[in-house]
Image: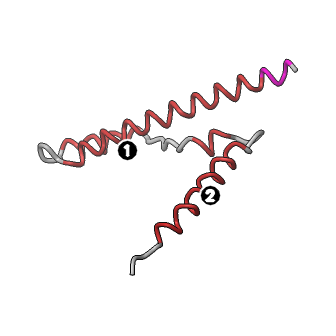
Amino acid sequence: MKSNVKCCLRPAVALVTLMLWLGACAMDGSDMTLSVCPPVVEYSQAELARAADEIEGLPEGAVLTGMLADYAVLREQARYCTKIIQRNEAHAGKLQYLR
C-alpha cells in the first residue's frame, strides 16, 4: 500500500506558508528590519586580523575559502536588505506625516 503522507502535507505546508506571509504583512508599525533582514554580526579589527591569518594558513584550494566567499555575499545582501527596509520605513514615515 502506498503512503499518502505527501498528499496530506501539501495543504499543511501551503497553509503555514500563507500564514507566515500574511503575518509579515500585518506588522505595520513594528521594526520590519529586525523581522525581515538577517542580522549582520560586526567583528573587531583584532578578530578580522586573526581570521585573515587563519585563512592564509589554509591549504591551496580549500573548500572553506569558497564557503567564506559565499558568507561574504550573504553579509552584503543582509546589509542591502537593511538599507532598503530603512529607506522604505523613512519614506513611509514622510508619507504618513503629509497626511
Q: Give the colouring mode of the picture.
A: secondary structure
Residue 47: image location, x then y, percent? 37, 44
Q: Which residue matches tag 2? A: 15
Q: Which residue sits at x=39%, y=81%?
A: 1
Outermost residue toward the right in this view: 99
Q: Callout 1: helix, strand or loop?
A: helix
**Amino acid type, residue under disc 1 in the picture:** Glu
Q: Callout 2: helix, strand or loop?
A: helix
Figure quadrant of the C terminus: top right
Count numbered badges in the picture: 2
Residue 77: image location, x then y, percent? 46, 34
In the image, is residue 34 part of the stretch drawn in magenta?
A: no
Q: Is residue 13 left or right of residue 47?
A: right
Q: Which residue matches tag 1? A: 47
Q: Residues within 10 Å of mark 2 (few under 14, many from 20)?
A: few
Residue 82: image location, x then y, percent? 57, 34
Q: Is residue 47 left or right of residue 21?
A: left
Quick one: 47 or 16, which is closer to the camera?
16
**Amino acid type, residue under disc 2 in the picture:** Leu
Which comes before the other along the chain, label 1 or label 2?
2
What is the number of the mark on residue 95? none
Q: Is residue 36 left or right of residue 77?
A: right
Outermost residue toward the left in this view: 60
Q: Which residues are magenta?
A: 94-98
